[in-house]
Image (spheres, rainbow, N blue to C red):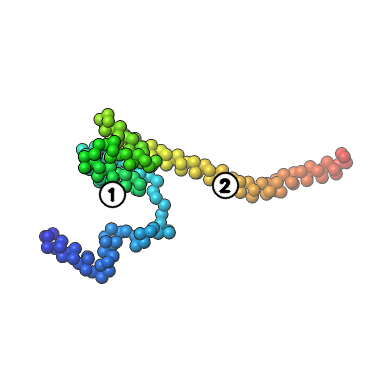
Amino acid sequence: MSAAAVLLLGVAVVVAPGAGDAHVRLTNAPDDPGGDAGASPPDPLAAAGTYDLLAACLRSGMPVSAAAAAVAEQAPEPLGTALRRAANLLALGAEPEIAWQHAGTDPSTEALARLARRSARSGSALADAVTELAAEQRAAVEGAAAAAAERAGVLVSGPLGLCFLPAFLCLGIAPVVIGLATRVLGQGAL
């Protein structure tokens, strides 16, 4: 496609009806920037995916600042902000201790900041550590899901017990007790 065709296509998108919403249509962003009440909850594995993507970028040979900047675009918040800030500071030549300092203040990004600072000090590969961090994140999500499933099982057993226990007593135990009582009392044992 020639440069003129690309220019005409860009003008058509902007000038077309509803041009004020062109940016929204192109980025598929929601109309309500405050958030949608029916929006789905954030993906608990998004951070692990971000860590895997960061590790892949680092393994491909990208510098840490470029890899962090590339990954920050799709990272969940506050991880995206921490990666963007660290990438900008590293690109400007800041020391890794200073660049990752802000990320270390948030509990959700503190582990990544600690790994990045340790990697910068010791010269160890950050990609392997970030891959392990992604595995830990997935294990934590899996453990939380298993705990929630176990809690649900315990919480469900109470109402089920309240429903089935009276039926068991009325249909299982009571006829046996009544039958035994009539035999014992009918034979004159008492």
Q: Is residue 11 above or below residue 62?
A: below
Q: How far across and how far down the image is residue 17, in percent? A: 26, 70
Q: Is residue 99 visible?
A: yes
Dividing the picture into quarters, in which one does residue 141 lie? top left
Residue 142 horizontal/vertical position (percent): 43, 41
For image coordinates 64% across by 48% down, the residue present is: 162
Q: Judge left or right: residue 171 versus residue 157.
A: right
Q: Which residue is found at the position 38% from the left and 45% from the top?
A: 45
Vertical position of residue 119 compared to residue 50: above or below = above
Q: Residues within 10 Å of mark 2 (few under 14, many from 20)?
A: few
- Residues 38 and 169: in front is 38
Residue 19, numbered label: none
Residue 117 percent location from the top left of the image: 30, 34
Q: How many angstroms separate mark 2 from mark 1 (CA)?
A: 42 Å
Residue 103 position within the rendered picture, expressed as x and y whole percent measured from the top left: 33, 41
Q: Nearer the viewer, residue 136 or 168?
A: 136
Q: Quadrant of the C terminus?
A: top right
What label does residue 156 carry, if any? 2
Mark 2 is on which residue type? Val
Residue at the extreme top of the image, as rendered: 122
Residue that badge 1 annotates = 73
Q: Is 59 displayed left or right of 32 in the figure?
A: left
What residue is drawn where x is 81% and y is 43%?
Answer: 181
Q: As drawn, is 5 to the left or to the right of 149?
A: left
**Residue type indicated by callout 1:** Glu
Q: Nearer the viewer, residue 151 or 114?
A: 114
Q: Nearer the viewer, mark 2 or mark 1?
A: 1
Instruction: Identify the secondary structure beneath mark 1.
Output: loop
Seen at 43% across and 59% down, the residue is 37
